[in-house]
Structure formats: structure tokens, C-alpha cells
Amino acid sequence: MKEKKKAKTAPAIPTDPPKAPATARVLVADASLPNRRLIREALTAFLNCEVDDAAAAEHACERALQREYALFIFAISLPDMSGTLLDRLLARIYPRVHSDTHTAPPVIFLVRGEDATAYHEISRDARVRGSVPLPLNLDTLMNITSSLLPART
């Protein structure tokens, strides 16, 4: 019997255009509205990200459970709960709510002079990427976040 040669076909051309990378989201929790606004303006001006903010830990926790984030920025001193406790809580529940993640995002703490001891205790955690002193030091903030978030193009 004769075998028929199969005609070679070109590989299928994808019809969907390539998707643009998703914009990174940052969650900021600090009681100070001016600090939250400065952080939002600095990050969105130089980095490709969107910033959500909350004045209290309760609101920050609700937002973290509703959306996925690339970075948390928490003040250690929040009105209803410490930022370190908020981070520990989210480290436990965030991966259970967002099934496609294995761990909560990295965290940066906003630290006042009196919060240095609390920061020192939690700074050994692998997710903690640094601290920004208050009053807000934008140079420190941008130095830390530039390695964690994509640059604006």
C-alpha cells in the first residue's frame, strides 16, 4: 500500500492580541490623610501602580480581602489595631481568600520614633522589605518601592 504524504500546515496564528501586564496594586494604611495622599502621588507618578488607602486597620483588612495587592504599606500605629498585628492577620488569611497566591504581599512599615522597638521585632520576617520613617521620607519610600513595583513607562 502506498502511504500518502501529509501536507505540512503552518502553525495556527493566535488571534488574541497580547495582554498588557496588569497594573500592580498597593494598599496603604495610615491614619494620616496627608501621608496617604503623598504616598499615592509619589508612587503613581513614578511607578506603574494603583494605590488604595485606608485610615484604619479594619478598612485595610476589608480591602485586602476584596482585591489582590502587590505591596502593603502599613503604619505601625493605627487607630484600631497595630500595623504589625494587621500584617500578621493578613499573612494568615490573605492566601486563603486569594487562592492563586501562596503568601501575602511584601510589606513596608511607616515608623515613628516610638515605634522602633515594634518594627525591630517584626523586621526579621521575610515579607518585611523595610521601613519609612515618619515624618514621611519620600526618598526612602521610592528607594524601597522601586525594586518591588514596575517603573512607569
Image (tube, grey):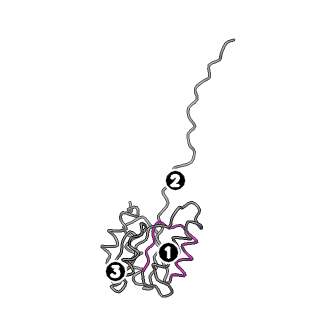
Q: Nearer the viewer, residue 91 or 42?
A: 91
Image coords of residue 76 (percent x, y): 42, 81
Q: Quadrant of residue 13?
A: top right
Going from the N terminus, do you reach mark 1 or mark 3 first?
Answer: 1
Residue at point 62% right, 22% down? 6
Question: Where does the image place residue 143, in percent across and percent down from the top left?
Answer: 32, 68
Q: Position of residue 32 (x, y in %)?
A: 42, 85
User: Identity of the amino acid at label 3?
Assistant: Leu
Determine whether the residue tagged by mark 1 lies in a helix, strand or loop. Answer: helix
Q: Nearer the viewer, mark 1 or mark 2?
A: 1
Q: Which mark is residue 136?
A: 3
Rendered residue at 35%/65% (across/down): 146
What's the CA distance linking mark 1 and mark 2? 34 Å
Q: Which quadrant is home to the N terminus? A: top right
- Disc 2 to disc 3, C-alpha distance: 36 Å
Q: Which residues are magenta?
A: 57-75
